[in-house]
Image: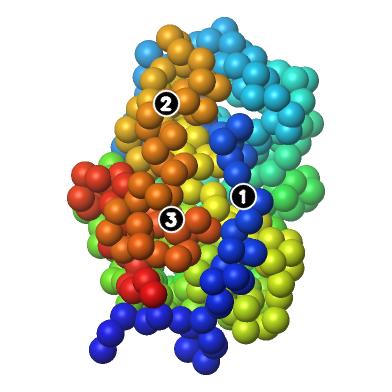
Amino acid sequence: MPPPRVRPGTTEPSYEAVRAAQSGYEYTRAPMLIYWELTRACDLACRHCRAEAVVDRDPDELSTDEAGALLRQVLAFGNPLPHMVFTGGDPLKRDDLYELIEEAGGMGIGVSLAPSGTTRLTQGAVRRLRACGVQSMSLSLDGSTPDRHDAFRGVPGCFEMTMRAAGWVAEAEIPLQVNTLVTEETAGDLPAICDLLALMRVERWSLFFLISVGRGTALREVTPAEAERLMEWLYGLSGQAPFAIKTTEAPQFRRVALAGMHAAGLDGAGVRGSSIGRGFGIRDGNGILFISRTGDVTPSGFLPLAAGNVRAASLVELYRASPLFTALRDTSRLRGRCGRCEFRAICGGSRARAFAHTGDFLGEDPLCPYEPA
């Protein structure tokens, strides 16, 4: 059977519809999101950890003074400023976390936080994060039961700690995103996880399709056919779920969604205004950058190619002018099926997965089964 061309039961969007959907997505001036790995330290031992986290902090992490200097560099992007996501490891392992959140907020930089579900994430910590100005938080849930989730996280009781923390985040009225890993092992549990989330106060469900980096090299990705089926299911779910749905390192979800939106009669403005459409065009290096604990600037946490380091170079110049980032923003340079695809501007494939599989960050994304027209 040939690979799918369109969602079953729909017609393929016209070239004009594709162009209308992808217009207006330009990230040459500044990224929309900056992910900052404050520390590698974490008390969990997750099987898929990108950072291969350890218990103790790296002595070469950016110091408090260097972190403040980095925040001032972000101001040089100009308005509107990028939004920053403080991640790790576990950001709560840094003693200066609250200070950095307040400093960023004082500069007008919005901050979200991605902590780990450990005993550090207490009700008091959540309340203090709210008082410091955290605008949203994310928690990871990789199983619908304690056994399933804890098996991935490597620490008994992590499921219960995460569920309690989710309740405290809701009480503090902090918008919550739940992140779920998509692998061969978790795919069958996704409907049950979805049912669990429907009982919680969740703003967004983000599904992270595995990239074989860090400890994740020991896990198995879903097949392209299974990925397509999951995205069909997610798009159908997006019209019913009480939360928004997005994918990470699976931008082909946008192709699936656009076909559904086209069938529903949405025009370009309607597509761009939707919760899924607002992510069109964003991918590693285009709308996103990542800063490691030691200051290396990469297109994402899953694409370990450094354009430079903030200790020696301008963050703004690295994003705007480095050969790595400019190449990633030029979809005419994509190769293979991604380069031929009519959806390359709104999707572009996972550059991290292309690199992990082939060593070519401009190559085709092997997770996608779509054959371009």
Residue at 40% x, 50% y: name it.
332
Task: Report if the CB atoms under discs 2 and 1 are less than 8 Å apart.
Answer: no
- Seen in the picture, residue 144 relative to 138 is either above or below; the reply is below
Q: Which mark is residue 322?
A: 2
- The kind of residue on which mark 2 rests is Ser
Q: Residues within 10 Å of mark 2 (few under 14, many from 20)?
A: some
Q: Is residue 61 left or right of residue 126?
A: left
- The kind of residue on which mark 3 rests is Gly
Residue identified by numbered label 1? 25
Q: CA distance from mark 3 to mark 1?
A: 13 Å
Give x and y (percent) for residue 135: 73, 40
Q: Which mark is residue 175?
A: none
Residue identified by numbered label 3? 348
Give x and y (percent) for residue 60: 38, 13
Q: Nearest the camera: 244 or 153?
A: 244
**Quarter of the rendering occupied by the N terminus:** bottom left
> Which residue is outermost to the front?
16
Q: CA distance from mark 2 to mark 1?
A: 20 Å
Q: First in sequence: mark 3 or mark 1? A: 1
**Location of residue 17 by image quarter:** bottom right
